[in-house]
């Protein structure tokens, strides 16, 4: 099978590419613009082969997309390319509208033109898999806001969209475009909405790597507000496995929520990382006794969602996918990875990234 993966040099896309190359005979066409968040070094050279093709292309470039479809004749598209950082979307939403909305539209049109020219048999096998986020659903009641003992709701595939940030609004728009292309043109699509990911090769502006690297540098560990916001954390390799499962076995026209059943408060995540670093990196920077002492509460993000939590029953029941990592095992692997892969993050950080940006 030939899979066209957009955004395959990013955090989740590179996990998808690594998973495909390691666990199948499939060919991957990694299509990525290589923005500040894209890094082809996230695909180690020892797993690249003739089954790995890289195309540096912007998903807003219709001419180039057309060329890629004609040249590589993919059986499926896995669309991950996006601007993905909420704080950046608040500072400058334009890029998010351009890539996430206009780019998805441009890619849908290129895919539709290509799909229309396939034989009936090939058409029946083709799928456009759009990768999205649980943030399109807005937020959920927080345990602090409800009476003790009240059952807390989860996001299901039927939850109405109510995005809060320019990022989540742009992703919601792209989800609507994908559904419209399915309904109007009959192009076979499938959508997944996933919770917060963490793991290796995560760009250091996001919460988990930001905290690990700031702690190792003896810098303040910024936590928004009181750190009570709840996210449902999923190890990136579990997400990559779920995505490939959906691309290969998902039912056309369906949506699948993906999550780890790991609801954690942001402060709890930061404290867990500090405790792991106390154990795994005991030679602390000068003046630091415990990494937790570096925690600094900062002004909350505007419009900050209180709680996200996914009901992942559908993908578990229909496609037999379950996460393999608990939060405890996954976060330990993640901290260990950053400690033994300094070269990767030092090279990444020598680029556009500024260490003083706040985490997601
Ligand atoms: P990322 O920011 O790490 O990677 C995005 C990739 O897309 C980068 O390699 C970048 O170079 C590429 N890209 C950006 N604009 C492009 C363009 N115009 N043309 C071609 N390539 C472009 O993002 P991520 O965290 O890996 O997220 C991947 C996808 O998964 C996104 O669609 C995101 O909305 C979704 N998602 C992310 C999370 C999460 O926790 N990170 C959770 C759920 C869903």
Image (cartoon, rainbow, N blue to C red):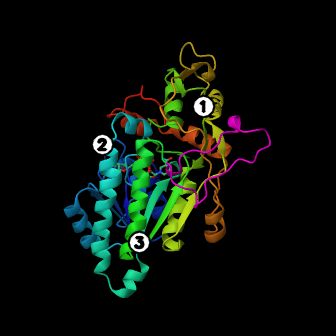
Q: Earlier in the sequence, mark 1 or mark 2?
A: 2
| Residue 247 place in picture, x, y as percent | 48, 68
| Residue 155 place in picture, x, y as percent | 61, 53
Secondary structure under tag 3 reads helix
Residue 322 placement: quadrant:
bottom right
Q: Earlier in the sequence, mark 2 or mark 3?
A: 2
> Closer to us: mark 1 or mark 2?
2
What numbered label is drawn on residue 182?
Answer: 3
> Closer to us: mark 1 or mark 3?
3
Q: Earlier in the sequence, mark 1 or mark 3?
A: 3
Q: Which range of residues does the magenta coloring cover?
A: 136-162
Say whether residue 216 is left or right of residue 141. left
Residue highlighted by disc 1: 270
**Main SS of residues in magenta:** loop
> Looking at the figure, which quarter contains the N terminus?
bottom left
Residue highlighted by disc 2: 94
């Amino acid at each position: 099978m030939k899979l066209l993966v957009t955004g395959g040099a990013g955090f989740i896309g590179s996990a998808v590419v690594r998973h495909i190359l390691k666990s199948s005979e499939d060919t991957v066409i990694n299509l990525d613009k290589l923005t500040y968040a894209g890094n082809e070094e996230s695909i180690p050279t020892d797993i690249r082969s003739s089954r790995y093709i890289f195309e540096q292309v912007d998903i807003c470039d219709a001419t180039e997309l057309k060329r890629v479809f004609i040249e590589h004749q993919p059986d499926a598209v896995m669309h991950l390319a996006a601007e993905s950082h909420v704080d950046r979307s608040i500072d400058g939403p334009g890029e998010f509208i351009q890539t996430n909305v206009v780019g998805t539209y441009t890619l849908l049109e290129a895919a539709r033109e290509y799909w229309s020219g396939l034989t009936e048999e090939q058409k029946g096998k083709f799928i456009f898999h759009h990768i999205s986020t649980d943030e399109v659903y807005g937020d959920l009641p927080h345990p602090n806001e409800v009476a003790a003992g009240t059952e807390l709701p989860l996001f299901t595939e039927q939850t109405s969209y109510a995005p809060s940030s320019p990022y989540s609004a742009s992703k919601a728009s792209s989800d609507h475009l994908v559904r419209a292309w399915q309904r109007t043109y009959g192009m076979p699509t499938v959508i997944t909405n996933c919770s917060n990911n963490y793991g290796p090769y995560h760009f250091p502006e996001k919460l988990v790597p930001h905290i690990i690297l700031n702690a190792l540098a003896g810098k303040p560990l910024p936590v928004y507000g009181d750190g009570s916001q709840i996210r449902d954390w999923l190890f990136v390799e579990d997400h990559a496995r779920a995505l490939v499962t959906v691309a290969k076995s998902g039912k056309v026209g369906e949506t699948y929520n993906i999550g780890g059943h790991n609801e954690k408060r942001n402060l709890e995540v930061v404290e867990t990382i500090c405790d792991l670093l106390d154990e795994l990196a005991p030679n602390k920077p000068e003046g630091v006794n415990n990494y937790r002492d570096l925690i600094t509460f900062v002004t909350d993000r505007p419009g900050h969602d209180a709680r996200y939590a996914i009901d992942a029953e559908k993908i578990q029941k229909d496609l037999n996918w379950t996460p393999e990592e608990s939060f405890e095992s996954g976060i330990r692997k993640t901290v260990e990875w950053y400690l033994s892969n300094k070269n990767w993050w030092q090279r990444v950080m020598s680029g556009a990234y500024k260490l003083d940006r706040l985490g997601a």
